[in-house]
Image (spheres, rainbow, N blue to C red):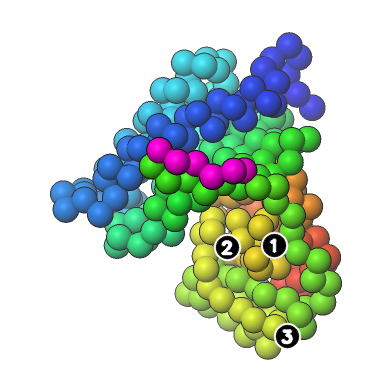
Amino acid sequence: MGVVNGPSIADDLSLALSVVVDADLIAMGRFRSLDLRVDTKPDRSPVTDADRAVEQVIRERIAASRPGDAFLGEEYAATGTTGAAAAGRQWIVDPIDGTANFLRGLPTWGTLIALAIDGVPVVGVVSSPALGRRWWGARGHGAWAQDIQPGIDGVPEALTVSRVAGLGDAYFSHGAIQLWSGLGRAEQLTRIASKVWREHGYGDFWQHMLVAEGRIDAAAEFDVQPYDVAAVIPIIEEAGGRFSAVDGTPGPWGGSALTTNGALHEPLLAELAH
């Protein structure tokens, strides 16, 4: 897997980390703004002018540095060949994951930038400036997190998932209950909740970053697009965890997400299978 004589993964990670700084500045400039424009997309999900502005600057920066790469973002048409079977390099971007939180003035939103090679995410950056936290990971380069404040960045910390081995000791997070219910999975969620030590609906990118940090042990959600989770995958895997769709399908293309510390993956896949 890989592109012969192309940029190294370290170079791509460095680019993504540089680009996300520009994205953070734009997003924070619109966060809690009184003139924030909010529209409704055809799928009834909200989109703000900040979503579009952030994606635009990321596209421009990536195109300038990697002109031959494909690009898949949430807000604008894809460029190049994208998808699970796409050969070569494609950047997969969610300009603001957690738009509903962003437009309500809640701090749990972030920008997600991933690079996939031959359909497999190998670089992931997740930045949440309102939370003051940034996470990243790349194949063979570990997973890291850093506290970020205007003009002052903390020391990067290596991430390692938890060692909890049994559901009865696990802290489990889930996405919106409405989505579980709408897919006929409310009983699954209730059953899992009755078996684990604690459950909470952190939702979106943050629950998966909490898994990577070892703060919680597993997280699952439905109705996700590739740009919702592609950046999560290298971070989770480099922290020693595991990612798949809830049916066990690897990669960001399965329409759902299950992240765990690894030890809990098979037990939760079994719970989600019936």
Q: Up-down: is 189 above or below 20?
A: below
Q: Up-down: is 266 above or below 167?
A: above
Identify the residue position indicated by label 3 in the image: 195
Magenta range: 151-156
Q: Residue at x 47, y 45 (%)?
A: 148
Tell me the number on the disc at residue 214. Answer: 1
Residue 166 x, y percent position in the rendering: 82, 77
The quadrant in which residue 224 appears is bottom right
Residue 116 x, y percent position in the rendering: 65, 33
Residue 51 x, y percent position in the rendering: 35, 43
- Judge the density around disc 3: few (<14), some (14-19), many (≥20) Cα neighbours within 10 Å: some
Of circles 1 and 3, the one toward us is 1
- Judge the density around disc 2: few (<14), some (14-19), many (≥20) Cα neighbours within 10 Å: many
Residue type at the position of mark 1: Gly
Residue type at the position of mark 2: Gln
- Judge the density around disc 1: few (<14), some (14-19), many (≥20) Cα neighbours within 10 Å: many
The mark that comes first in sequence, 2 or 1, is 2
Of circles 2 and 1, the one toward us is 1
Q: Residue at x 29, y 50 (%)?
A: 31
Secondary structure of the residue carrying numbered label 1: loop
